[in-house]
Image: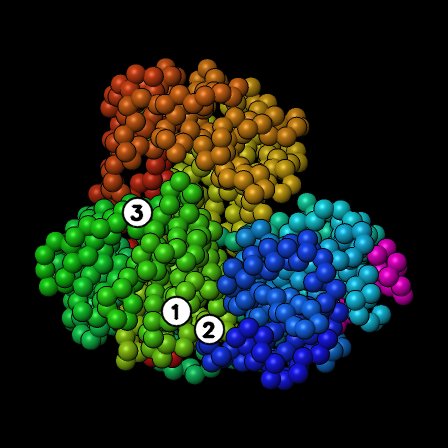
Amino acid sequence: MSIVPGTRIGSYEVLSLVGAGGMGEVYRARDSKLAREVAIKVLPAAFAADADRLHRFDQEARAAAALNHPNILTVHEIGSHSTASGSFPYVVSELLEGRTLRETLGEAPKGLSIRKAIDYATQLATGLAAAHEKGIVHRDVKPENIFITRDGRVKVLDFGLAKLKEDHALGGSTATMLATQAGTSAGVVLGTVGYMSPEQVRAQTVDHRSDIFSFGAVLYEMLSGARAFKGATAADTITAILSSEPPDLTGDHASVTPALDRIVRHCLEKTPEMRFQSARDIAFNLEALSTMSVTGTAVAAAPSMARPTLRYRVLAAVVAVAMAAVAAAMGLWRLASASRANVVFRQVTFRHGELDNARFTADGQNIIYTAAWEGAPPEIFTVPSNQDGGRALGIQNARLLAVSKTGELAVALAPRRAGGNFLIPGTLARGLMSGGAPKAEIENVCEADYAPDGKSLAIVRSVPDERLTQLEFPIGTVLYKSPLLTDLRFSPDGKYLAAIEHRSSGDDRGNAIILRTTGEKVAAGPLRDSQRGLVWSPAGNEIWLTSPLADARVFGLDLKGRSRELLNMPGRFFIRDAAADGRILTDEGDTRRGIVVVTDNGESQRDVSWLDYSFLRAIANDGKTILFEEEGHSNNGGYRTFVRNVDGSPAVEIGLGYGVAISDDKALTLSMRLEPAPELWLQPVGAGQARKLTPAGWTATNGGRFFADGKRIVTIAREPNRQNRTYIQALDGGAPRAITDERVTGVLISPDQRWIAVQSPAGPALAPVEGGALRPIQGAQPGDAARGWSDDGQIYVANGQITSLRIDKLNPLTGARTRWRELRAPAIVGVRPVLPFITPDGKTYAYGYGLGFSDLYVMTGVR
């Protein structure tokens, strides 16, 4: 079929033929309604004769049209055009300028550069993830269906058409091989066959993991210039897909790192269960690999086991301030980028305590900030930007969220700490900087920022039932969901929103993302072990963000996802705001984490911290041993699990991962590893091999307990495409057995081993170990955190604020409560206790603590 220029198809005027192939012809056309140029794909007339096939295509294509993702071709309309000789179906989409990945690879016989390959692959994985999350599988991922625009944007083509092609052929998944009957050349046959998954060539049912295999084949070709699977005939290629591995990438291609090669291999596993289970995971892993900065300096690759929480060198606050002053005087604060310009710091605050958020006012003349001085709850202060100190605004127990250009403040009232790292969430309230109490509006708000107009507000809201946060703009319209989003900021032109995406509420490991205000993700930065603090550059063309570990590093990320390092210097700080004249607000300080054990009914206590960031996870029932992991800089990458006796004897390292639980006989522990996916492992304290417990494809959470017999555990996990629930798992083999519905989770086992204390959407409850109806826990109060069972069948519950915790014993059957202990932060500024672990007899308990100090600085010289 050939359409003459000038022909009208609906509201579109055909201008010229762009290309043709087995799936029809593509024309450039003009949309007379919206005065824009579009692409029209006219499908072969043979498809119009099969009403059932067309119906299925229409459903598939409409689903694809609803994706609205920057890495997927935007479909505007699907229709049928009637002519004197009959009718034909067509698809109207955005008109792209550029070329296909196949054409790009044709000019790179030895493969693309590592930077380009990772960039294109990350965008491709992100696009596929968006489709898979909507239940749409492409089924024909190959270089011909991947388009690279002139500005480097990857677009996945032909969602919906892939299914149509598959339906058209004999034998279901053999369709791609037989597509030559519709006009595909013999040379393309092998190329197409070479990207099919083993389950496709076997004509088995396929799901999104088939696309992941095809993705791996495409990535292999981008890196090597050669196809992963290619034989002299289609049959030879199929044999290779089913039984052979492609040549090693790290041998002939020295620039391909082992980590990148592992990602490719993981995609190309023959069995779907052994591959990456989501394209989103692939994107995260690719972002964690080394990329090239705009100055050509390699950014260090993230370790396979990343440190999750704030981890810095152990320094007393006075020493940190003194060293900072000496370093500034000696001129050690310098740019590490190509400009080598001097960076100057001016200290603004000098009190003892911790800072949180800080903002310049719109005119740059004043600073508004949150601080918890001398152990008090967080409060809002203001100070002229050329002075130091500050005065309170009278907004107590609150966290600053944003400042509008009209002088309005958005704050979170009564914020609470999550996971020891973040003050989230609180009740959003707004009021004027000039005075007066702010008006409470929305609960469970973590972050907020005003649009440049000073009126509209974007927020990040916590959704406890889903254990997620969601970005809303305008308020009520959900643009994005993630386990935790922090540091939300509008671009100066109001077209984009940037934030840092974390994997969990207790983990500052994360990566920056940039979204359009309509929700499409346009860029994502590399995954870094610590990522906190984000601002837009004064020019508005990139974001600046900090990754503070043992030193302070500032990175830039532009709208194309390109990362560069602006600053690398001793110390540690968070970037908080940037003024139009280039001044930057930072807070600099130090933090660590430790463990205290209290014995003899509260009479004796001992600090049993080990290295610089000891994170308590459990105490043995006899009160003599604790389980913890080290997460700090001294750990040199990864989580390492330890046990230590409370008498102060040296700690013993027992393996990798987060600590989870220790058995009653102290012979076994549970730990959670994050790579390649969150998995629960059984680790012996003494000699023996660690063993994975989480079934393939499942996702574990950092929760679990041993039964008294040491032969079973209770744990929280989720099966593929399901939500978290509670399971019982025998340690001698067999699949986990669900004992609750989805979204009902808990691991605290009653002394008689019959009940598990759980949290359900309806509230705290007891779940029978053998399964059955939940029994509501009587007398539970808002804010209660269950910490364990007592010997007499009651539950220890903690409730309180950041600086103090009240612990009661609660009878779950009658609701009766009796006071047990009250834990208060010691009279040392910057120290805060964390929820305790209590032995059943109540004679011993252990708690973690955080120690942090910081001061506010105005910094100049970064560009």
Q: In the rendered structure, find residue 444 and report the number of the disc placed on it.
A: 3
Does residue 597 appear to the left or right of 155 in the view shown? left
> Under tag 1, what secondary structure?
strand
Q: Position of residue 741 (x, y in %)?
A: 49, 30
Residue 577 location, quadrant: bottom left
Chain part drawn in magenta: 220-240
Left or right, 399 with respect to 114, comes to left
Instruction: Check disc 1 and report the residue beneath it.
Output: 496
Q: Is residue 175 visible?
A: yes
Mark 2 or mark 1: whose residue is earlier in sequence: 1
Quick check: 797 above or below 200? above
Which residue in the protein does label 2 denote?
559
Q: Nearer the viewer, residue 821 or 215?
A: 215
Kind of residue at badge 2: Leu
Q: Are the residues at dot 3 and dot 2 in contact (C-beta closer than 8 Å)?
A: no
The amino acid at mark 1 is Tyr
Q: Are marks 2 and 1 in contact (CB under 8 Å)?
A: yes
Q: Quadrant of the N terminus?
A: bottom right
Mark 3 vs 2, N-terminal side: 3
**Amino acid at pointer 3:** Asn
Residue 358 is a magenta residue: no
**Cα–Cα gap, marks 2 and 1:** 9 Å
Q: Residue at x 54, y 66 (%)?
A: 77
Check disc 1: other Cα within 10 Å, few if <14, some if 14-19, many if 20+: many
